[in-house]
C-alpha cells in the first residue's frame, strides 16, 4: 500500500522513499540521475528500484538518450497504484473529483447547493460519491492516498471543522466536523483548508511559470489565496476573511467588524443587497424579499435589472482598489478575481479589472483571469495538498 510506504519513517525505508520522491518530482529519470542526485551508491539504487518496481509503485517508460552504450531505462511513478480525491465545498456547489497520482482528473461529480442541502445531506452525498469512485475504478480505501477538502471559512483546520459559513442557502452550516464525519467511513489522510487556498494551489499547478499568484474571492466576505515565491502563504487561524478589512477610508462606511471604511463595507454582497433595498425598494420587495440572501444574489444575476446595475457596478471600483493593493504588496504576476458577481454578472469582471489597473502602484505586466467556481482549480488544489503532504515529509 503506497500510503503505508510513504508514512513509514523508519531508517530502512528512507532510501526507498527518497528515490520515490525524486522520481515523482522529476517525472522521468534514469538510474544514473538518481545516483547523482541522491548520493546513494549504485547497488543500493539498483536494489531499491527493483523493490519499487516489484511493489508496483514505479514503472519503466522507455529509454533515455544513449551516451555510447545501451540506452538507460527511464522510471516514473505508477499513477494508478493509488488515488486521491479532491473536494471543494462552496455556497454555489460542492464538487468532488478523483485524480491519479499524476493529478490527471479521472472522474467528477457536483452538487448544486440549494435550500435543501443541509450539511448531513451533502456529507452523505460526498461519502456516496467516494464509494462510487472506488467501485468504478476498482480500488479500496487502502489504495486511497488521501482526501483533500477546500471549504468556505472561517475554519478550524486542526480539528477539521467548518465554523460558520453563512449565508449558505440553508442556515445550518455552523460548527460542522466535516473531516471527522468523512474519516469515520474512509480512514485515509485528509487535508482541510480554505477554498481560496486550494483554488490558488490549483491555479499554480496549471501555471507554474508564475512565481507569485493572487486569488481574490469577493462574496459575503473576502477570501484570498496567495502563492508567494512559489509557496502557499498560510494564515494559521484558518480565517482568511481579514483581507477584506483593510481600511480604504477612515471616515467611510461602518463595517460589521466595528471599524469604518473597510473593503467589506463597500463590496460585501450583504452591503450590495442593503443598497439595492435602499435605492430600488420596488425591485427588492418584488424580486428579493422572500428569499434567503444567497438566493437573492441568484435572482439579481438572472434578472439583470437596470435599476440595480449602478449599485452593483459601483462596488467593483472598491474591489479594484483592494485587489490593486494586494497585488502590489505580494508582487503578483497572475491575479485571479472570483465571486458570484464577478463570474456571472455582465460587465462586472471588466469593471473590476479596469479599476485594478487604475490603482496599481506601478505599471507592470500583471496577467488577469476571471475566476470560475465551476473550474477544477479548487478540487485540483485540494488534491495537490494531499500529495504534497507526502512528498515534502
Image (spheres, helix red, strand yellow):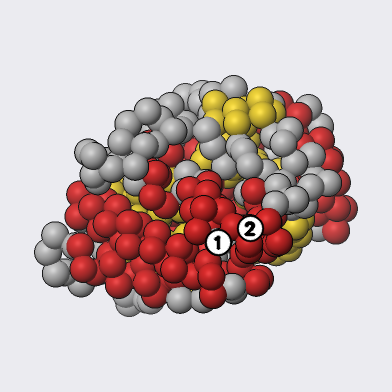
Q: Give the structural element (helix, strand or loop) at label 1.
A: loop
Q: Residues within 10 Å of mark 2 (few under 14, many from 20)?
A: many
* Numbered tag placed on residue 74 in the rendering: none
Give the percent coordinates (x, y) of residue 373. 58, 61
What residue is pinned by disc 2? 284
Residue at the location (54% across, 31% down)?
155
Q: Is residue 280 left or right of residue 264?
A: right
Give the percent coordinates (x, y) of residue 153. 54, 37
* Numbered tag placed on residue 280 in the rendering: 1
Q: Quadrant of the C terminus?
A: top left
Q: In this view of the protein, which residue sits in the foreground, 233 or 91?
A: 91
**Quadrant assignment, res 332:** bottom left
Question: Does residue 141 appear in this view?
Answer: no
| Position above or below: 137 against 242 | below
Q: Quadrant of the N terminus?
A: top right
Residue at the location (54% across, 26% down)?
156
Give the percent coordinates (x, y) of residue 223. 44, 46
Amino acid at each position: 500500500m503506497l500510503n503505508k510506504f510513504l508514512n513509514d519513517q523508519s531508517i530502512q525505508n528512507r532510501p526507498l522513499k527518497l528515490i520515490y520522491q525524486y522520481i515523482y518530482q522529476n517525472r522521468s529519470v534514469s538510474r544514473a540521475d538518481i545516483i547523482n542526485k541522491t548520493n546513494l551508491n549504485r547497488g543500493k539504487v539498483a536494489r531499491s528500484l527493483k523493490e519499487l518496481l516489484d511493489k508496483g509503485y514505479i514503472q519503466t517508460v522507455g529509454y533515455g538518450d544513449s551516451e555510447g552504450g545501451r540506452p538507460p531505462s527511464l522510471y516514473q511513478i505508477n499513477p494508478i497504484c493509488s488515488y486521491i480525491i479532491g473536494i471543494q465545498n462552496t455556497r454555489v456547489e460542492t464538487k468532488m473529483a478523483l485524480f491519479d497520482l499524476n493529478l490527471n482528473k479521472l472522474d467528477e461529480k457536483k452538487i448544486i447547493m440549494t435550500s435543501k442541502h443541509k450539511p448531513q445531506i451533502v456529507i452523505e452525498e460526498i461519502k456516496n460519491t467516494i464509494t462510487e469512485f472506488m467501485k468504478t475504478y476498482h480500488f479500496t480505501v487502502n489504495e486511497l492516498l488521501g482526501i483533500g477538502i477546500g471549504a468556505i471559512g472561517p475554519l478550524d483546520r486542526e480539528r477539521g471543522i467548518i465554523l460558520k459559513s453563512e449565508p449558505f442557502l440553508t442556515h445550518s452550516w455552523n460548527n460542522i466536523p466535516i473531516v471527522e464525519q468523512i474519516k469515520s467511513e474512509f480512514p485515509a489522510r485528509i487535508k482541510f483548508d480554505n477554498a481560496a487556498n486550494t483554488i490558488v494551489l490549483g491555479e499554480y499547478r496549471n501555471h507554474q511559470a508564475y512565481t507569485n499568484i493572487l486569488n481574490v474571492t469577493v462574496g459575503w466576505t473576502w477570501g484570498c489565496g496567495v502563492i508567494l515565491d512559489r509557496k502557499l502563504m498560510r494564515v494559521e487561524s484558518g480565517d482568511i476573511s481579514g483581507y477584506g478589512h483593510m481600511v480604504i477610508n477612515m471616515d467611510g462606511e461602518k463595517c460589521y467588524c466595528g471599524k469604518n471604511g473597510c473593503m467589506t463595507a463597500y463590496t460585501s454582497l450583504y452591503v450590495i443587497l442593503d443598497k439595492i433595498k435602499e435605492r430600488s425598494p420596488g425591485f427588492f420587495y418584488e424580486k428579493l424579499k422572500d428569499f434567503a440572501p444567497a438566493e437573492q444574489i441568484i435572482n439579481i444575476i438572472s434578472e439583470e435589472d437596470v435599476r440595480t446595475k449602478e449599485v452593483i457596478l459601483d462596488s467593483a471600483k472598491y474591489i479594484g482598489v483592494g485587489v490593486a493593493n494586494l497585488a502590489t504588496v505580494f508582487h503578483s504576476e497572475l491575479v485571479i478575481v472570483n465571486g458570484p458577481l464577478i463570474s456571472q454578472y455582465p460587465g462586472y469582471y471588466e469593471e473590476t479589472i479596469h479599476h485594478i489597473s487604475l490603482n496599481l502602484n506601478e505599471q507592470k505586466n500583471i496577467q488577469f483571469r476571471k475566476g470560475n467556481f465551476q473550474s477544477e482549480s479548487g478540487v485540483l488544489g485540494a488534491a495537490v495538498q494531499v500529495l504534497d503532504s507526502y512528498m515534502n515529509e
